Amino acid sequence: MLAAVEALRQLHPLQIIVATPLASPSACENLKKEVDDFVCISMPEQFEAVGLWYQDFKQITDEEVKELLARATKGRPAGSYLEQNDKEGRWNEQVRKAALYS
């Protein structure tokens, strides 16, 4: 999550808001320091692993993630908010880096 926050920060947004259904208390404290607003529904003291708190927490492959991301962005109109406000091309550079390291 911190890596995602850092990638977003490089785009110079007005605010960074993080919301999550579940996290450890220490992760919540760390994230609160790095963002403008942070919401976490549940912070169990005896947090061991995210997967233990879900009925179904199947692992997915990198290929499945790439396919889902491609589907999510397919059909977006040209001139989207990011394209219009990313004068220096930082968004596309971050997406390219993420694809290289996945």
Image (spheres, grey):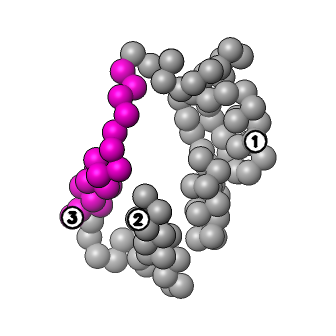
Residue type, mark 2 in image: Ala
Is 11 situated above or below 54? below
CB contact under 8 Å: marks 1 and 2 = no
Q: Residues within 10 Å of mark 3 (few under 14, many from 20)?
A: few
Query: Compared with residue 23, is residue 67 higher up or lower down, i.e. above or below?
Result: below
For mark 2, give the secondary structure.
helix
Residue found at x 31% / y 55%: 66
Q: Which residue is mark 2?
A: 99
**Magenta region includes residue 58:** yes
Give the CA separation, mark 3 to mark 1: 36 Å
Residue beneath label 3, please?
Answer: 75
Residue 26 is drawn in which quadrant? Answer: top right
Chain-order first, disc 3 or disc 1: 1
Q: Residue at x 62, y 29 (%)?
A: 23
Choose between 82 and 65: the one closer to the eye.
65
Q: Nearer the viewer, mark 3 or mark 1?
A: 1
3 or 2: mark nearer the eye:
2
| Magenta region | 56-75
